Amino acid sequence: MNSIWGTYPWFLERGVDKIHPDDLENFKKETNNCKAFECIGEDDDFIAIKYNDRIYQVKADLFKTIPAPYFNFGQKVKLKNSDDEAVITDIMWHSTNQEHYYFLIVNSKKKSKRYLESEFLR
């Protein structure tokens, strides 16, 4: 089965009922329209979405599917313009450009630059 990925554009104004009460406080820290979550399960009331190693239960109505990223969290990658090895820490979705972008740790330092899939060696 292929993974289902999506964004979850939730903010407090959309209602706390969208997030399972057990996950609300931690999910508030994830609030970002651009984060790419993997949907890993569902039941009658909630879907389970995963961001890196964190799992949250949320209502399905705000989940917007996107293509699965080519690279994944924690994956070691090589940049085309560098010999340095990098590790993926964040996977985001650019809704206007319809593409993923990534944040990395390079040489033990978190980079603030966004990296596109086209910038990695495959």
Image (cartoon, grey):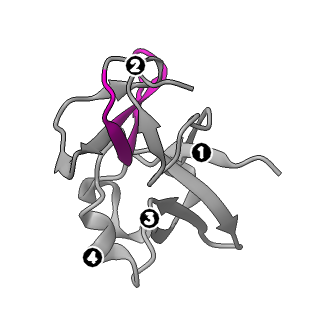
What quarter of the picture does the C terminus occupy? top right
Between circles 2 and 1, the one closer to the viewer is 2
Callout 1: SS: strand
Q: Report the disc number at residue 35.
A: none
In the image, what residue occupies the spot 44% across and 54% down? 74
Between circles 4 and 2, the one closer to the viewer is 2
Expressed as whole percent of the image width and height from the top left, the position of residue 48 reads 58, 67
Q: CA distance from mark 2 to mark 3?
A: 41 Å
Q: Report the disc number at residue 18.
A: 3
In the image, what residue occupies the spot 30% across and 73% down? 26
Q: CA distance from mark 4 to mark 2?
A: 39 Å
Give the extent of the magenta segment: 82-102
Q: Residue furthest right?
A: 1
The residue that label 4 is drawn on is 25
Q: CA distance from mark 4 to mark 3?
A: 13 Å
Disc 4 and disc 3 in contact, CB within 8 angstroms: no
Callout 3: SS: helix
| Label 1 or label 3, whichever comes before in sequence order | 1
In the image, what residue occupies the spot 50% across and 24% down? 121
Q: Image height check: is 115 above or below 25? A: above
Callout 2: SS: loop
- The residue type indicated by label 1 comes to Trp
The residue that label 2 is drawn on is 80
Q: CA distance from mark 2 to mark 1?
A: 26 Å
Q: Image height check: is 60 above or below 119? A: below
Expressed as whole percent of the image width and height from the top left, the position of residue 77 reads 45, 38
| Label 4 or label 3, whichever comes before in sequence order | 3
The residue that label 1 is drawn on is 5
- Horizontal side, residue 35 vs residue 67: left or right: left
- Horizontal side, residue 22 vs residue 43: left or right: left
Q: Residue furthest front?
A: 83
- The residue type indicated by label 4 comes to Glu
